[in-house]
């Protein structure tokens, strides 16, 4: 397992940790402020949300690289199934392809996919996963041509219904098998997978070469809001070292992306304090 005690080159910030995924949250730093602050603290990479980028993808990507970092990924594709999709099939696919184009313009090698939930009028997840697989398959060639890999992120079962129809890493890998394209893999997020006792074996048996992202945070034992009350690493009950050991044993050697949704705590703190805490916790606890 990699030693991060004196090396933060694998540390990436997902800007949701500063509240940038929700209107009106955080301190409202510009991408330039985030880039400069992360570079000064030795971060190796950044992951932006589409809402921050607008039409400045090329400019922002170049600024990140000029600061000595990489754009590790982009969050995220639109929901591809379920009640939260926006528009008809043509509109969804157009937005999906636009997200891929934005990732390519940024120089981000990975676009994160969150599936979306259960199709209206259906029961269970079968129909929704079929719809999800179809839409991913139709976009995969475009992504490959842009040099972008697609990372399907299973979400904690608490989000089953509206936000996800893929709730375990095993289910995500099943869908990857069904679509069967080389640029589709998975993202493993501590928040969504920490509870799954089968995870180490599933990763060892099935995930080698298919892990495209590893996301860090923690699960608070007294979680007050399942969406916006994630813990900073060390503030919860997840076994962070064991989880990374399992991910790396399956061959993953990429960025460790800190992604903390925290409306009542970390988003209210000065961004510099948040970033300093991220670095310290990463070096000592992850």
Image (cartoon, rainbow, N blue to C red):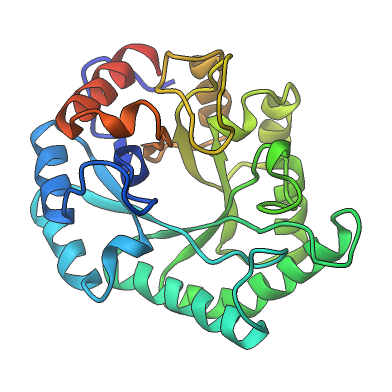
Q: Is residue 232 left or right of residue 134?
A: left
Q: Note whether 75 is above or below 229 in the view shown.
A: below
Residue 68 at least partly seen: no
Q: Quadrant of the N terminus?
A: top left
Residue 75 in sight here: yes
Above or below, 34 relative to 53: above
- Residue 31 picture location, percent across and down: 18, 55
The number of numbered badges drawn on the structure is 0
Q: Using the rendered view, name the quadrant where residue 201 is placed.
A: top right
Q: Is residue 265 left or right of residue 168?
A: left
Residue 160 pos. (x, y %): 74, 46
Residue at 51% x, 15% y is 236
The residue at 17%/46% (across/down) is 34
Depth order, front residue of 49/172: 49
Q: Nearer the viewer, residue 87 or 168?
A: 87
Residue 279 is situated, as x and y percent measured from the top left of the image, at 24, 24
């Amino acid at each position: 397992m990699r030693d991060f005690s004196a090396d933060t080159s694998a540390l990436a910030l997902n800007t949701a940790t500063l509240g940038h995924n929700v209107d009106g949250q955080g301190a409202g730093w510009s991408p330039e402020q985030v880039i400069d602050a992360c570079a000064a603290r030795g971060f190796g990479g950044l992951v932006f949300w589409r809402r921050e980028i607008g039409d400045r993808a090329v400019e922002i990507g170049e600024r990140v690289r000029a600061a000595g970092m990489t754009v590790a990924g982009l969050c995220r594709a639109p929901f591809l199934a379920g009640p939260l999709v926006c528009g008809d099939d043509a509109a969804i696919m157009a937005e999906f392809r636009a997200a891929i184009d934005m990732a390519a313009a940024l120089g981000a090698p990975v676009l994160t996919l969150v599936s979306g939930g259960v199709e209206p009028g259906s029961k269970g997840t079968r129909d929704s996963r079929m719809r999800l697989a179809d839409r991913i398959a139709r976009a995969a060639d475009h992504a490959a041509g842009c040099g972008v890999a697609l990372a399907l992120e299973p979400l904690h079962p608490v989000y089953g219904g509206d936000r996800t129809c893929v709730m375990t890493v095993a289910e995500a890998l099943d869908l990857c098998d069904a679509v069967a394209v080389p640029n589709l893999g998975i993202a493993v997020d501590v928040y969504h997978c920490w509870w799954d006792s089968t995870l180490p074996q599933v990763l060892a048996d099935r995930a080698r070469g298919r892990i495209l992202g590893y996301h860090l945070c923690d699960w608070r034992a007294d979680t007050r809001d399942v969406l916006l009350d994630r813990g900073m690493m060390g503030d919860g009950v997840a076994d962070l070292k064991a989880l990374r050991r399992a991910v790396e044993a399956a061959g993953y050697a990429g960025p460790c992306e800190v992604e903390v949704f925290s409306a009542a705590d970390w988003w209210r703190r000065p961004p510099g304090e948040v970033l300093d805490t991220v670095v310290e916790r990463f070096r000592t606890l992850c």
